[in-house]
Amino acid sequence: MAMMMVMTMSANAMSYTAAKNEALFLSDKMAYELNLTASQYDRVYEINLDYLMNLNGRADVFGIWWDRRNADLRYVLNAWQYDKYITLSHFYRPVAWKSGGFTFAVYSHYNRGHFYNAHPKVYVTYKGGKHHKPAVHREAPKMHDSKPVVHNERHMAMATKSSRSSSGHFAGRR
C-alpha cells in the first residue's frame, strides 16, 4: 500500500525538462512586466525552477515551496516590483491543480513560445537546489555595544566623530 502511494505521488512530479521550460517562460514574463535587472532575472529563474521542481501534486501547489518562493522573491525584488508581483495572479499563483495535473496561469496572458528576453545566464548551468534552504531575509542593522553597525564611509565618519567626543578610553582627553 505504501509503495503504491509513493508511486502515485512521484507520477505527478514535474520532470526536470518541463520545470526548466516552465520556469524560463514564467521568468521571462516576470522580467518583462516587473522590469527586472539581469541579476534579478537570473535569481528569479532559479527561484521559479526550484519551486517547479518541487511540485509533486496538488498539496505542493500552495505549500511550503510556494511560501519559500514568495519569501525568496521578496528578497530579490525591490518594493515596487514585489507589490506589483503580488497583484498579478498569473505570477503570484502561477500553478494550479486541475483534472489531476498542473496548469499554468501565465499562458492565459501570453502566447506560448514568445519570449521578450534572452535566456538568463544561469539557464544552462543552474540545475536546481540552491533555494532549498529558507530564504535569507533583510534584517534591520545589527547592534553591537549599543551602536549601529556602520554601512558606508559617511556614517563611519559621523559615528567615529560622535564616539570620540563622548565615550571610549580617551573620553574627555584632548
Image (cartoon, rainbow, N blue to C red):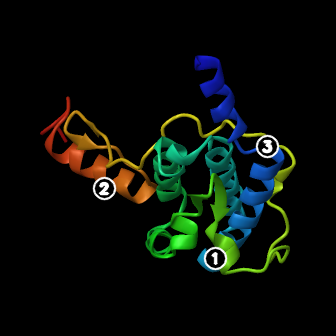
Instruction: Work out how far the residue at label 1 is from the one at label 2, CA to CA, in angstroms.
Output: 36 Å
Where's residue 166, x and y in %? Answer: 14, 44
| Residue occupied by mark 2 | 158
For mark 1, does the 10 Å Cα neighbourhood hold few (<14), some (14 to 19), or many (20 or more) residues? Answer: few
Quadrant including the C terminus: top left
Counting every numbered tag in the picture gives 3
**Amino acid type shown at disc 1:** Asn
Cβ–Cβ below 8 Å for labels 2 and 3?
Answer: no
Quarter of the image for residue 54 reads top right
Front-most of 75 and 109?
109
Instruction: Work out how far the residue at label 2 is from the one at label 3, CA to CA, in angstroms.
Output: 52 Å
Q: Residue at x 31, y 55 (%)?
A: 158
Position of 118 relative to 131 (above/below)? below
Where's residue 73, x and y in %? Answer: 53, 57
Front-most of 6 and 63?
6
Front-most of 134 and 146?
134
143 sits to left or right of 85: left
Quadrant including the N terminus: top right
- Asked whether residue 32 is in view, the answer is no
Where's residue 147, x and y in %? Answer: 24, 42
**Amino acid type shown at disc 2:** Met
| Residue occupied by mark 3 | 16
Quarter of the image for residue 53 reads top right
Q: Residue at x 75, y 50 (%)?
A: 19
Where's residue 10, x and y in %? Answer: 68, 33
125 sits to left or right of 110: right
- Asked whether residue 108 is in view, the answer is yes
| Residue occupied by mark 1 | 35
Position of 40 relative to 4 (above/below)? below
Which of the two labelled residues, at mark 3 and mark 1, occupies the earlier sequence position?
A: 3
